[in-house]
Each structure stands twice: as C-alpha cells, then as structure tokens.
Amino acid sequence: MAGQGGSQGSSQESKVRPGQRRIAQWTRDYARLPGIPDEYIGPDGAPRAAWTRFFDAFAALSPADIERRFASADRHLREAGVTYRAPGETADRLWPLSHLPLIIDEADWQQLTAGIAQRAQLFEMVLRDLYGEGRLVTDGAVPAAAIAGSNEYLRAVSGVKPPGGRHLQLYAADVGRGPDGRWWVLNDRTQAPSGAGYALENRLVLSRAFSNLYKSMNVERVAPFFEAFRDSLRASADRDEPRIGLLTPGAFSETYFEHATLARYLGFLLVEGDDLAVSGDRIYIRTVAGLKRLDVLLRRVDSNFLDPLELDASSHLGVPGLIDVLRKNGVVVANMPGSGVLEARALLGFLPSLCRRLLGENPIMPHIATWWCGQKAAREEVLSRLEDFAIEGAYGRAVPGFSSHGPVLAGELPPAERDRLRQAITDRGIDYVGQELVRLSTTPVWEQGRITPRPFVLRVFAAATPQGWTILPGGFCRIAEQADARAVSMGDGARSADVWVVSDKAVSASTLLPGADTVRIRRIAGVVPSRAADNLFWLGRYLERAEATLRLIRALGAPMRDPVKGSSTTSPSVERIQRLLVTWGATSQATRTNPARVIAEALQSEEKFGSAFSLVRSVQRTATSLRERLSPDAWQIITEMVDRLALQVDDDDSIVSAAELTLQELASLAGLAQENMNRAAGWRFLDMGRRAERAINTARFARQFAYDEAGEEDLDVLLTLVDCQITYRSRYLVGPALAPVRDLAVLDPYNPRSVAFQVATLNDHIAALPSLKEHGLIERPQRLAVALQATLTTAEAAALDVKTLFALEQDLLNLADAIGLHYFPHGPNASRPEKLTGLA
C-alpha cells in the first residue's frame, strides 16, 4: 500500500509540476517595465490573484493544445471576415486579436465603474446646460472660447430639447492605470463611441477558443449591457414598437464591420443616409414597399455630416432636414448632434470644478493633468517648461501646424521645430493643450511561447437607462506592439484583447433573447431598405456571373485534362469559348496555341473585370454591405472562394480543379440561400438577381453555341454550360440535335436552368412584391416579365434563330434594368410615398 501510495503521489506530482514550472518560468521571463503599473504583477511585485487563477488553468494546457486553440481563434476571425480599416487606407485588415484576455477582478472593476458612471452623468448635465440655459458660460465656470473654438459645438441645435430626454445615450472613456495604481481617464468619447461591437466579437472568439477556462473564471457576461442599451433606446421613442436604425457612413467606413455586428446583434436596421428621407416632421426609411417611419437613430456618423442643409453642405452621409425633424421632436438621435463638443481637451481642466458645481462631489476618477493654453496662466506654465509636456490639439487629435496625428512630444523635437511649436502656442494658444507625460500601464500578451508586457488602453462603455448608467463589464482593449507607447490606435499596429471581469462567485448566463411569454408572434421579417435590396439583387447577379465564367473555364479546360473525351484545343468550339471570355472581359485575347494562358487569366486575373477572381471579389464587396443580413456560414464560403482564387497556381490541372471547387462552393451558397433564408423580400431580390443573370447568360450561351449551323460539338458545349447533359441524354436517345437542345436550354419550363424557368420565377417574385402606386395598373417590371413569359410559352424551338435569341437577350437585359429602376431608384425619384399592400 505504501508503495502504491508513493507511486500515486509521484504520479500526481509529475502531473502538476510541468504547469507549475511553466508559470514560474513565465513569471521570471516577464520583463516588467520599471515604474510602470502592470495588470499581471501588482505593486508588491507578486502576481495579482485573478491572473494567478487564470495562469493556473492556462498552464494545465499542453503547448500543442494552446497553439491549437490560438489557431482556432485566428481561423474564426478569418472565416467570419472580422475586419477593420486603418485611417487613410482603402483595404480591410484582418482583426488583430490578442490571444490572452485582459483580466480585471471584481473589486478593481467596481472602482472603475463608479468613476465612469459619475463622469457620464456629469457630461450629460454639461451638455444639457451648453445647449440649454448656458449658465456655465454666463457664470464663468467655462470660458466661452473653450466651447466656441470647437467645430463640434453646433449652433443649429442650440435650444433644441433632445427627443427622448437625453443628449448622451452611450458614453465611453479610454482609461489606463496611473502611477498610483488607480485608473485614470485618458480620453472621452461622446460623439459616437466605437468599439463595443468589436468587444462583442472578441468575447465570442475567445470564449469559444477557451470555453472551459472561460467558464471556470466566472467571467461577467456582456449580454445584459446590450439588452439594457437596446431597451433604453426602445423606451426613448414615442410609440410602443419603435423602428430603430443604426446610421453608418457605409461599407468604406473604418469600422463598418462593427456597425453590421451591432445591428445584427441588437436587431436594428443598418441604414445609410441615402436610405432615409424627411417627410413632414418625421424621418422615413426608403424601402421596397415605400416609406416606413423610423423612430430612433443610433448614429455612427459624426455630427457635422448629419444634415447637409444646416451643417456641412458637402456631406453625402447625412439626411437633409434631420435637424429640423429634431426641433419638431420627430426622431430620437443617439447621441444627440453636438455631443462631440465634450471630447475637446480644452475642457478637461474645468471638469473637477464642474463636477463639484453640478454633482456636489469630487471626481471619483482623475484624468491626465491638462493645461489649456487659451488661458494666460496655463499658457505661461506650458511655455516655461515646454520639454516636460505632450502638446495636443485642443479640439482634435491632430496638433495644428504639425503633420503628426497624435501628441507632439516637445522634448523630442529638434530645436528649430521646438521653437516653431513655442511660437505657435504663443500666437494662438486657444488651439493647444499641454498634458502631463504619462506612460501607459501594461498587460500580458503571448509572444513566441512566453508572456510579455505591452502597454494598453481600455475603453469602457456606459449606457443610459431609466435606472441609471449601466457599464459594459469588460470593454474594448487596444494593446500596443511597442514596449514604450504613450497612445494606442488600431491604425498604429496595435492589437485588441477581450476583457474579462472575473468574480469569485458563479455568474448567471445571460442572453439577448427575451422570455417566451413576452414575445409577440410575428411572421414578417421587417422592412428591407431599397439600398439593401439593391445590394442583394446585385449579389445574386455577381454570383451567377462568376458561375457562368467558371463553367466556361471548366469547359475550356476539359480537352487539356482529358484529350480522349474532350474536343481538340484548337476546335471551333474552343475558339468560341475563348472569344466569349474576351467579350466578357475575363481575358485579353483568344489564342489557338496556348489556351492554358487564357484559362489562367480568366480564372485569376486581378486586372480583368470579368475574371472569376474579380467577380468573386465583387461578390465579397457587395456582401460586405450586407453583413447584417448574411449568415456566418455564407460569409465563410465567400471568404474561402476569394482565398482560393487569390492563391496563384501554375499547372493546368490545378487551375481547372480550383474552378471546379469554386463552382461547388457557389452551389453551397445557393443552397444556403434556398434553405436558410426567410422567404421575405430580401430573399426574393437575391433570387431575382440570380434568375435575371442566369436567363441572360443562358440566352447568350444559346446564341453562341446553338446557332443555325451548330454541330454536335457546339451543342455538347452548350449542354455542359447549362448543366443539362444528364437531362438531355435521359430524354433523347440520340446525340445533341439543334431543336431539342434549344428547347431544353431556352423554352423548357421544367428545366431549372432554362430561360423560361428563370422568367417564370421572376414573374412569381415580382407578383409577390408590393405595388408602389395607387392606380392599380400592372407596373413596368411585371409588364415586361409577363410579356417575356408569354413569348417563351408560345415560341417553338425551330424558330429560335440567332436573331431571335439576340432579341431575347436584350429583352432580359431590359427586364433587369426595369427592376432596378423601379425598386432601387436614386436621386429625385428615390422618395415613394405611395404604398398600399404587400411584403415589406
């Protein structure tokens, strides 16, 4: 027994020791920066308790398991298309997620949240006065120049009482630990705080990668915060079931992915300025069913761009007349236009006295010591020891007169530049602030199998609710790549991290799904903005164009892969395929001697607009504008197609194989749309786009390969292109003949690839969509579709010559254009007030 007991103890000891040794090694290697507050190592030099719990569990994983989980997180980000765009860039970057979370214990978090809630309430009261009675300026509590100097102070909304009763619905503060270990505010975000959607995505990814570790740490859930925020917006409207929209600048915004994530998660409509119109004292959404009233607008567009009539006249992002609707209490806008004035650093020095004046208490959380150079005493203080300050713009991130987008460290400037800065502050101090030089606190990151300290900034979010300010338990954390960083921006090579607020007690699971007894049953998916319907229609068209191009590539590669079964690489049919690819813009020119070059260019060229790669990229760009409407599975398939075609291959067999695999993925995407999308207007426009494009392409294929003198080889190519080989051979016991092939490809109403089938389906879709006029007459898209269906129903295969097929192709193009003009109008025709019945 003693021997067994000793053996068991030795076995248990051997199981524990590797993890303990790893923790000890990590702690020894952790190169903590001297004098800098750190989240892992406390002021006493020992690891904090919350981090000890985390690393105890983390070290129990084998190195291989750790790397596998990290790879799983990266793969999810890539497949889900989680991206962002750095300022000034046009291409999206993959979201850079740190593999270790930032961990904050519950007691530490309570200190932070109390300060954030107090600061949010103070800002709400300041805004109420600045745009109301104006007593703070009148009494000298805030200099008028500190307010008027900011272009975010909007005189157009002065005196306007915010619909819903609040200026701020969402507030955020960037914080870090100060030298004394307390949290300090670095920046305030009152305009349109970003990052909450990315925080949500970070949580989703990391909690999946380390599910058991996440549960064992008792991490506070984020769902209650978003639920409270959504309910607060809903309660701010003046009717029981309000329609809420999230206003985005569009797909070219730096944080568009976040906008789509929040809209999908909260159940809001993602809208752009062109989707909205003012009528009377209300805001309406342009939908495929006419105008629909919008009650609440959560904006992610800066204030100055919201209304070109009263604010920035050059803006194409806003809604003409929006400010006037606000005056008439016709829509709730969160945050209220003009709230960005409180982001001005010129105001920081006045906040402690304002807190005592308005709240009757001292600030719970300090901010960086700031001197606004618009005041003589502060300006002289800054100039007297300029080398000790970081100089920032008083009203924006950029420092006037300097190219840097961040603070200017006067002590590191060349003497001539320092003198220029000194003179600029002397001449116009109102534009500058001096701030105390601080170094950001650090948190552990994982690099090459070890933990390393890196500076970070934590953005904490507060949402206004009827019960007070609710704080998101966690937040949006940005981590610098450099050990010495004084500011962190996602455009500066930073990465992001999930934030775990951990408790010693178990936390209850939360979700945004309401209880079953509180949900009112509905069978309509909601309105579809005209822009979204337009994008869905073109998504369908691009998908079908990509499929048609890939089928041509596969047909062209068949002789090279299987010379026995395929036609000659220099046959007339092959030349016809090549010429068609040239006409479609997929390749430069046809060549009899080197069809392999044609195939490679048509498949993977980045310059040719009609290549398969370019078309799949068009699919991806269009799908980006529809993120809130596409499932993760659909986005994953699109990402995989782009990645496959972007990977250059040289040999002929690999090129054709890539085309075939992409065709299979297109089929999977079509299957998802048919089986998983709700049969509302959105699905109809996606399917209409596919049907219209397929009909056009099939008519063109028939014209090219079923001409009057077409031989068996040309007809066989047509059957291959329209995927009807099996159907034809099961129906006819002879080789391809002209009339039967024409009938099957063009006129057969039972063939899901025929032109007639597409037109019949388009007719059904158009008939199910709402009528937009009150006159009760058949509208143009349906009139064209009915006429086309009648023509195809009464036509005979023998009469389908090239001229007839060309006319059919033109009629189909006209029908596609008519759908766009009718349901997706632009310019002065965009507002359509007439709407009687139909699906929205």
Image (tube, rainbow, N blue to C red):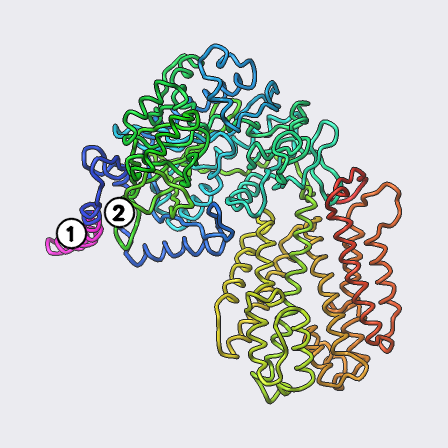
Is residue 438 found left or right of 795 in the rendered image? Answer: left
Q: Assign the N terminus to one quadrant of the image.
A: bottom left
Residue 794 is inside the magenta segment = no
Q: Which residues are magenta?
A: 1-23
Q: Residues within 10 Å of mark 2 (few under 14, many from 20)?
A: some
Q: Residue furthest bottom?
A: 564
Determine which residue is flagged by label 2: 452
Q: Residues within 10 Å of mark 1 (few under 14, many from 20)?
A: few
Nearer to us in this view, 826 or 214: 826
Displayed quadrant of residue 354: top left
Q: Residue at x 34, y 44 (%)?
A: 480
Q: Does residue 239 appear in this view?
A: no
Residue 7 is inside the magenta segment = yes
Determine which residue is flagged by label 1: 9
Give the Cα distance between marks 2 and 1. 34 Å
Is residue 580 found left or right of 738 in the rendered image? Answer: left
Residue 461 spot, x, y in % from top left? 45, 32
The amino acid sitting under disc 1 is Gly
Displayed quadrant of residue 292: top right
Q: Nearer the viewer, mark 2 or mark 1?
A: 2
Q: Evaluate if marks 2 and 1 touch, with contact meaning CB atoms under 8 Å apart.
A: no
The amino acid sitting under disc 2 is Thr
Q: In terms of sequence position, does the residue under pointer 2 or pointer 1 come before the other?
A: 1
Nearer to us in this view, 585 or 770: 585
- Which secondary structure type mostly characterizes the magenta part of the structure? helix
Q: Does residue 462 appear in this view?
A: yes
Q: Residue furthest top?
A: 139
Is 271 located above or below residue 14 in the figure? Answer: above
Residue 571 spot, x, y in % from top left? 67, 86
Q: Residue at x 87, y 66 (%)?
A: 791
Nearer to us in this view, 699 or 515: 699
